[in-house]
């Protein structure tokens, strides 16, 4: 078995946490999988996997090696397909990161249609609201809502999401419904803090087309859109969130919009990927698909 094949075997064992499951997926004898990983470890001179009777885990060296393997195998895969005439059925793994609520409510429910079009693709999806280092974490593309500052990346603008001010009915029944900006000083907010800086992002609003900010009291700060909404529903304070995804709560009356004349600025929605003149077919088809999916909602 050559080095590239051995790296593929190692990557699959690491992904599945099992030699036997990797052998089954790769359609190889278990002994072949074990020997391939052992030969790789012998060649580079370090142990990559920690084996016990119950599970297989990566060593510290294995984590670093897997990261390099992932990038190299993706490059080899892209080179193999670069000059193929038939790009309609790309194959391989796409590593994607999406905002938490967007993943749960929009993208994941639509993935069966994507796989029906591209059955030879696999997606490794993380759903987070934190900053993701595309290069360092070997992620092919991310979808982000909000302004983007990293000029080394390509951002494909899709549209924007309207944002509103709102709170749970239970909270407003206890504390009253603010009618003016001045009323906010007597209310609590659920703060959202940046995963990069740890700072609360502040309460924003548009006035005469100009973006302004207020610092308001709050008892809880979160860094997850799901936690943000959950804190609102629990009656912990006012939030600012995209209207999309809140429709059922608004219609039921569980959550109410407040201060409609002082809404925050719309959030731009973008698909972001590393600057690469030869974007691989597997990534290109996903970028095109998710852009079309989201543009239908946010354009």
Image (cartoon, helix red, strand yellow):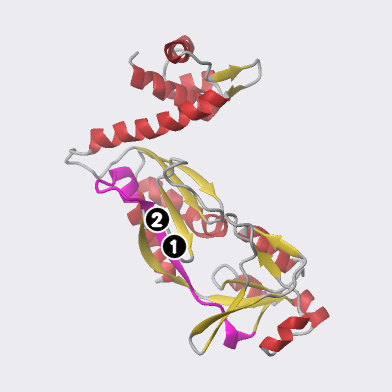
Quarter holding the C terminus is bottom left
Which of the two labelled residues, at mark 2 and mark 1, occupies the earlier sequence position? 1
CA distance for labels 2 and 1: 9 Å
For label 1, count other residues whose C-alpha is less than 10 Å away and answer few (under 14), some (14-19) or many (20+). Answer: few
Contact, CB < 8 Å: mark 2 with mark 1?
A: yes
Quarter location, residue 156: bottom left
The secondary element bearing badge 1 is classed as loop
**As rendered, which of 211 and 227 lies closer to the eye?**
211
Q: Which residue is mark 1?
A: 148
Quarter location, residue 217: bottom right
In the image, farthest residue toward the right: 174
User: Is 289 colored magenta in this rendering?
Assistant: no
Give x and y (percent) for residue 60.
56, 26
Find the magenta span and give its range: 259-285
User: Which residue sits at x=51%, y=77%?
Assistant: 265
User: Is 277 colored magenta in this rendering?
Assistant: yes
> Eyeballing the image, is 263 above or below 38?
below
Quarter location, residue 197: bottom right
User: Which residue sits at x=56%, y=78%?
Assistant: 264
């Amino acid at each position: 078995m050559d080095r590239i094949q051995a790296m593929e075997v190692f990557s699959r064992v690491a992904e599945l946490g099992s030699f036997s499951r990797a052998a089954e997926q790769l359609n190889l004898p278990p002994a072949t999988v074990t020997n391939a990983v052992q030969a790789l470890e012998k060649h580079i001179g370090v142990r990559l996997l920690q084996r016990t009777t119950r599970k297989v885990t990566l060593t510290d060296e294995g984590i670093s090696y897997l990261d390099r393997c992932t990038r190299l195998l993706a490059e080899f895969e892209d080179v193999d397909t670069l000059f193929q005439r038939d790009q309609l059925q790309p194959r391989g793994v796409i590593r994607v990161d999406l905002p938490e609520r967007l993943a749960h409510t929009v993208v994941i429910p639509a993935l069966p249609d994507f796989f029906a079009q591209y059955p030879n693709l696999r997606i490794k999806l993380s759903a987070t609201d934190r900053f993701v280092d595309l290069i360092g974490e070997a992620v092919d593309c991310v979808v982000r809502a909000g302004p983007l500052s990293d000029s080394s990346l390509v951002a494909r603008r899709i549209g924007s999401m309207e944002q509103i001010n709102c709170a749970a009915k239970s909270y407003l029944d206890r504390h009253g419904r603010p009618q003016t900006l001045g009323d906010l000083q007597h209310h609590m907010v659920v703060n959202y803090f940046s995963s990069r800086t740890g700072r609360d992002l502040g309460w924003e609003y548009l006035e005469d087309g100009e973006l302004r900010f207020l610092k308001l009291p709050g008892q809880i700060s979160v860094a997850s859109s799901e936690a943000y909404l959950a804190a609102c529903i629990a009656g912990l304070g006012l939030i600012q969130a995209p209207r999309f995804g809140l429709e059922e709560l608004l219609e039921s009356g569980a959550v109410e919009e407040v201060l409609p004349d002082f809404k925050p600025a719309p959030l731009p929605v973008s698909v972001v990927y590393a600057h690469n003149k030869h974007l691989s077919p597997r990534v290109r088809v996903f970028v095109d698909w998710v852009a079309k999916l989201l543009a239908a909602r946010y354009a």
